[in-house]
Image: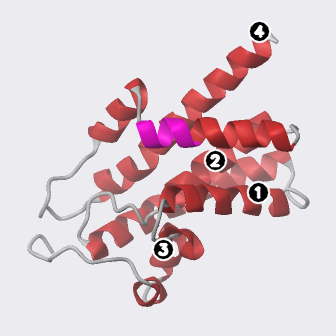
């Protein structure tokens, strides 16, 4: 695998393995522009739809199990793409934004939009702690993607979610 040339995520690639479906956010990561934003929008829509049926504890269980399954799916997909942290993998955005929404709800559409904007800022700009988290588990080009890199794909987005939640908590404390 270490000498495998990097591949591009396509619909055909996604259809070849269940891990690819999950890691690519059920297709949202195939967006040609801003796949992370597309994955976060998919997460938002999925949360709004599923929140009608899931209790708070069921959301916690879904996020926890989704993290374990996602670690496997992100590792397998990154390995099969031969890229340590492919932009098309968006399951990390999905889980992290579900975590944000789970912890800030109930809020209206404006509150959800603010959470979305803050999360996208922290995830894309990678200030301070997010940059640190992103660098913790990086693989080298040409190196076989292992479980550490699969975990790292998820880790920096959870740190971005944490930063988002800190800003929201500070705002709520001041207002």
Q: Nearer the viewer, residue 5 or 77?
A: 5
Judging from the image, what secondary structure is the residue with disc 1 in? helix
Residue 68 visible somewhere in the drawing: no
Q: Residues within 10 Å of mark 1 (few under 14, many from 20)?
A: some
Q: Earlier in the sequence, mark 1 or mark 3?
A: 3
Q: Is residue 151 left or right of residue 121?
A: left
Judging from the image, what secondary structure is the residue with disc 3 in? helix
Q: Position of residue 110 (x, y in %)?
A: 82, 39
Q: What residue is disc 1 on?
A: 47
Q: Is residue 40 left or right of residue 9?
A: right
Q: Residue at x 63, y 40 (%)?
A: 117
Q: Looking at the image, is 67 positioned above or below residue 127?
A: below
Residue 118 visible somewhere in the drawing: yes
Q: Which residues are magenta?
A: 120-125
Judging from the image, what secondary structure is the residue with disc 2 in? helix
Q: What residue is disc 3 on?
A: 30
Q: What residue is disc 4 on?
A: 174
Query: Badges 1 and 3: C-beta atoms under 8 Å apart?
Result: no
Q: Residue at x 76, y 57 (%)?
A: 47
Magenta span dominant secondary structure: helix
Q: Is residue 73 left or right of residue 97?
A: left
Mark in the foreground, 2 or 3 = 3
Query: Badges 2 and 1: C-beta atoms under 8 Å apart?
Result: yes
Q: What residue is disc 2 on?
A: 97
Q: CA distance from mark 1 to mark 3?
A: 20 Å
Q: Earlier in the sequence, mark 2 or mark 3?
A: 3
Q: Position of residue 171 (x, y in %)?
A: 73, 17
């Amino acid at each position: 695998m270490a000498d495998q040339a990097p591949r591009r995520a396509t619909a055909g690639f996604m259809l070849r393995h269940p891990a690819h479906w999950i890691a690519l956010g059920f297709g949202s990561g195939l967006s040609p522009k801003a796949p992370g934003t597309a994955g976060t929008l998919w997460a938002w829509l999925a949360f709004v739809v599923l929140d009608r049926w899931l209790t708070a504890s069921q959301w916690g269980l879904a996020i926890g199990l989704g993290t374990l399954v996602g670690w496997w799916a992100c590792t397998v997909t990154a390995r099969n793409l031969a890229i340590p942290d492919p932009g098309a993998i968006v399951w990390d955005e999905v889980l992290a934004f579900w975590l944000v929404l789970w912890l800030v709800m109930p809020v209206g559409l404006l509150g959800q939009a603010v959470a979305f904007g803050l999360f996208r800022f922290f995830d894309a700009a990678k200030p301070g702690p997010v940059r640190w988290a992103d660098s913790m588990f990086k693989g080298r080009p040409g190196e076989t993607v292992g479980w550490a890199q699969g975990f790292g794909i998820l880790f920096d987005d959870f740190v971005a979610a944490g930063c988002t939640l800190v800003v929201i908590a500070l705002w709520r404390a001041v207002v």
